[in-house]
Image (cartoon, helix red, strand yellow):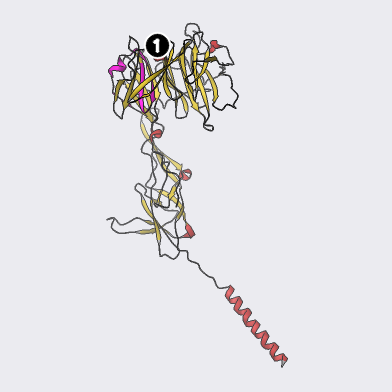
Amino acid sequence: MKSKIYAFAVLCMGVLMLSSCLKSNTDEVTYYEDTAITSFSLGTLNRYIQTTTKAGVDTVIKTTLNAGSYKFNIDQRNRVIYNPDSLPKGVDATKVVINMTSKNSGALFINKRTKDKMRDSLVYYSSNDSLDFTQPLEIRAFNNSGTAYRSYRVSVNVHKEDANVLNWQSVNGLDHLVASMKGLRALAYDGKMWFMGNDGTGSRVYVGDYDDKQLIWTLALEDVFDADAYRNFVLCCGYPMFLSNGKIYIIKKDGVGYGATAIDAPNISLLLGGAYQSVYAYSKNGQLMESSYMSEVWKEVEMDRDREWLPTEDVNFVSLTSKTNDDVCKLVLLGNRNAQQFAGETNAVIWSLVDETSTSGEKQPWTFYTVSPNSRQLLPRMKNLQVINYNNMLLAIGQNVIDASVSGGAVFYQSKNEGIAWQRDTVYAFPKDFTVTGSAFTVTTDENNYIWILAAETGEVWKGRLNELGWRKEQGAFEE
């Protein structure tokens, strides 16, 4: 009897084991109901570049562009996909290869629609197919069970203009106020264009409301200041300032107009500029001086070279904000030494200082950029030298280059390392119709990345901007 029971037990265990083995070999498929496009990128695209041969013949060169580095934003809330940084001009958007993935490996379809745009025409996505993105396309991501999908509007943005091109436009040409000046300086402040000029009787301050086509000048201050006051017209500590008859005038809003507060500075001969709360100037004995904003107390600064190396003609003062520290900036002082005393000098002289607002920072001396006789990257001595901070670099503009290796006329030089090395820049050039004469002109920039040129005597007013600095910045981060 026991043997029969034992045999029956063994049989039951065998059946159970067989059942367990059969169950382990049965695949269970799970269908996910949610879906989304999770990544999107481009492959290698064709690009056609217009250029000119040495013989002056216009031609088109076909090249390729690895577009995989161009980031695409996926806005899941609004269901749009686009590249915030547009592809360069000349990219062929009619044959675009894309790479994309979906959540839970859901199926992806391109909706090409019928010719009459009335019905959907879904084509299964393949990474080998090229698509026409001259217009946005609809792409659908289906869930695993095929019961629902998310529809995305996908755009591949391509620039219609070259990024590194400076376009100029004439603004209110032959303006009678500018034309009446013997010399002038300009700056941008409070969303307006300002200039101070000597009209032969003294220096006056004007402010202009500007739009795309014209400037409307009005007298900002009623007073007439000394003939050389315009040479000291600078933007310092956030306000326009100038020196006249032993006083520094600070311009601020005064109700509906503007007023000026005067600070005594009897020992100052030339106001240079500054940053944050520091103001710099030359004393009457030619020493570089420093003061605090709204202070009448001045002190000599420490320098690592004798003051005879300071520029005294075509003097420029530029403040460069640090890319890493908000309380640190680089100050650059540059210009020419006396033309008669240093007649053989063919290069501009340059000084710099790291200026910190932190009280814990140790004050450093002004540093002179020593000129190497073998260097080929020097800023040449130029008449009416103007230096501005533009596109994160120093841009120098001048005329009648003394350096014999460069032909005369108005030229641009650029420095990407805070004035240490300079190169002739062919991208930046004066407007073709700009009259380059012996008359003085002034150059400045505004908050919209425009370069402004105002020419005394001729009255010409121009503004120009690099194309890429006028492009709209797209949103780069999204939440579900």
Residue 389 found in image quarter = top left
* Span of residues in magenta: 169-196
Closer to the camera in the image, 8 or 445: 445
- Give the number of marks: 1
Q: Secondary structure at mark 1?
A: loop
Q: Position of residue 101 (x, y in %)?
A: 47, 55
Q: Quadrant of the N terminus?
A: bottom right
Q: Position of residue 232 (x, y in %)?
A: 42, 15
Residue 410 magenta-highlighted: no
Residue annotated with mark 1? 228
Residue farthest toward the right in the current orientation of the protein:
2
In the displayed structure, does residue 219 sit left or right of residue 262? Answer: left
Res. 412 in view: yes
The residue that appears at 32% across and 56% down in the rendered structure is: 113
Q: Position of residue 221 (x, y in %)?
A: 34, 18
- Relative to 290, is 11 above or below? below
